[in-house]
Image (spheres, helix red, strand yellow):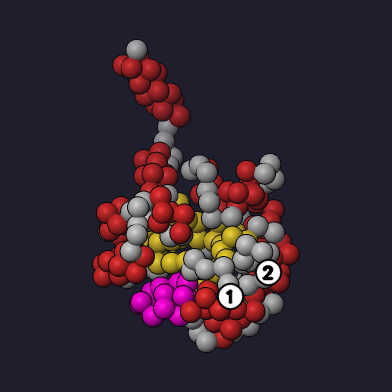
Amino acid sequence: MKIYADGADLKSILGLNANPLVEGFTTNPTLLRKDGVTDYEGFAKAVLEEVAKPVSFEVFADEFDEMERQARIISSWAENVYVKIPITNTRKESSIPLIQKLYKEWIKLNITALMSTRQVVELSKILDRETPTVVSVFAGRIADTGLDPIPLMRRAKIQLKPLKNVELLWASPREVLNIYQARTSRADIVTCPPEMIEKYQKLAGKDLEEFSLETVQMFYNDG
């Protein structure tokens, strides 16, 4: 399973690019806004000057004609770019007709914000060729509703497994445990914020009694 870094801080992205554990990057408009990006194309090109790993950049329109226009521009930035298209617009109109059109033109896509088996099944029906495609299921947000995302992710993997060049991505993880759960679910990719990647590298396989002692020492020193 691949680990992608999720964020829009240029310094962090360039630092993580040197980390062999990180095999790609994802962004979205909310992260860009949070990190103060005002020149989307300038930011993207600064990333792509240094990063040859897959990078996902999302459209930020709601009308499908404008989504298509933006998708073509974003796709033109570099060969390693995946264009993120939400599974629906804000009016709950399916993006699948647009996805199918771009997909048939061999534009690399990252279909985002999926949260139901029905959405995965409907999407899988049009993925009938070998265009590289990522299907991002927001497992963390599913878990926020009180539902276990693992059964849904496993069903999604079964649905997508016969399709060539289609990868299942576990999105919006909330804790390091989710990385292990994503692997158990047979996801191809998990995307994590930089601080989670750092914690994963630091704590994976750590002796729990040693960790207990360090915690007590922290409390003592702070006291």
Which residue is pictured at 52% across the width and 76% down the height?
Answer: 66
Residue 200's quadrant in the figure?
top left
Which residue is pictured at 42% across the width and 32% down the height?
Answer: 207
- Residue labelled with disc 2: 93
Which residue is pictured at 46% across the width and 59% down the height?
Answer: 28
Which residue is pictured at 35% across the width and 21% down the height?
Answer: 218
Sequence-wise, which precedes: disc 2 or disc 1? 1
Residue type at mark 1 is Phe
The Cα atoms of the two marked residues, 2 and 1, are separated by: 9 Å
Residue 183 at least partly seen: no
- Residue labelled with disc 1: 64
In front: 183, or 131?
131
Q: Magenta span covers which residues?
A: 70-84
Q: Give the numbered dot on residue 160.
A: none
Q: Is residue 33 above or below residue 220?
A: below
Q: Secondary structure at mark 2?
A: loop
Residue type at mark 2 is Glu
Quick check: is 45 in the magenta stretch? no
Q: Secondary structure at mark 1?
A: helix
